[in-house]
Image (spheres, rainbow, N blue to C red):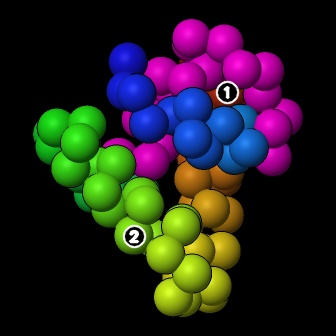
Amino acid sequence: MSFYTKHISELLKRAGADTTPENKELLDRAVRKTLDMERADAPEVWEKVKEIMFSGRDEKRKRKFEDSVVKLMVKYLITG
């Protein structure tokens, strides 16, 4: 499981999901899919997530990323 999911667990809450190991895996999957980084190493993904979510540079980009991840999370939770 990717270490960075603990830093973005609020996205689990927005998707209506509990913080479980299984849901953290789904969160990682949704983040990687959104970033088109399915095969990247976790540190590479984390660098991109930090750039988008925590740099404070582009709030519109951050919101779009978060909304996309949450939407995918909901889909994954429904379809399994």
Q: Residues within 10 Å of mark 1 (few under 14, many from 20)?
A: some
Q: Where is mark 1, residue-wise?
A: 77
- Amino acid identity at mark 2: Glu
Furthest residue toward front: 55
Tag of residue 46:
none
- Amino acid identity at mark 1: Leu
Kindly state the secondary structure of the residue where label 2 is placed. Answer: helix
Would you say residue 21 sits in the magenta stretch? yes
Give the position of the N terminus as an image quadrant.
top left
Q: How crowded is mark 2: few (under 14 residues within 10 Å), some or many (20 or more)?
A: some
Residue at image coords 34%, 48%: 46
Q: Residue 31 at x, y = what percent?
A: 44, 47
Would you say residue 32 sits in the magenta stretch? yes
- Specify whether 58 is left or right of 42: right
Instruction: Specify which label sits upstream in the sequence, 1 or 2.
Output: 2
**Magenta stretch: dominant SS?**
helix
Residue at image coords 60%, 44%: 8
How many labels were placed on the picture?
2
The magenta segment is 13-33
Q: Residue 2 at x, y = what percent?
A: 37, 27
Residue at image coords 57%, 41%: 7
- Specify whether 54 is left or right of 32: right
- Residue 48 falls in image quadrant: bottom left
- Specify whether 20 is left or right of 26: right
The answer to whether one can see residue 15 in this image is no
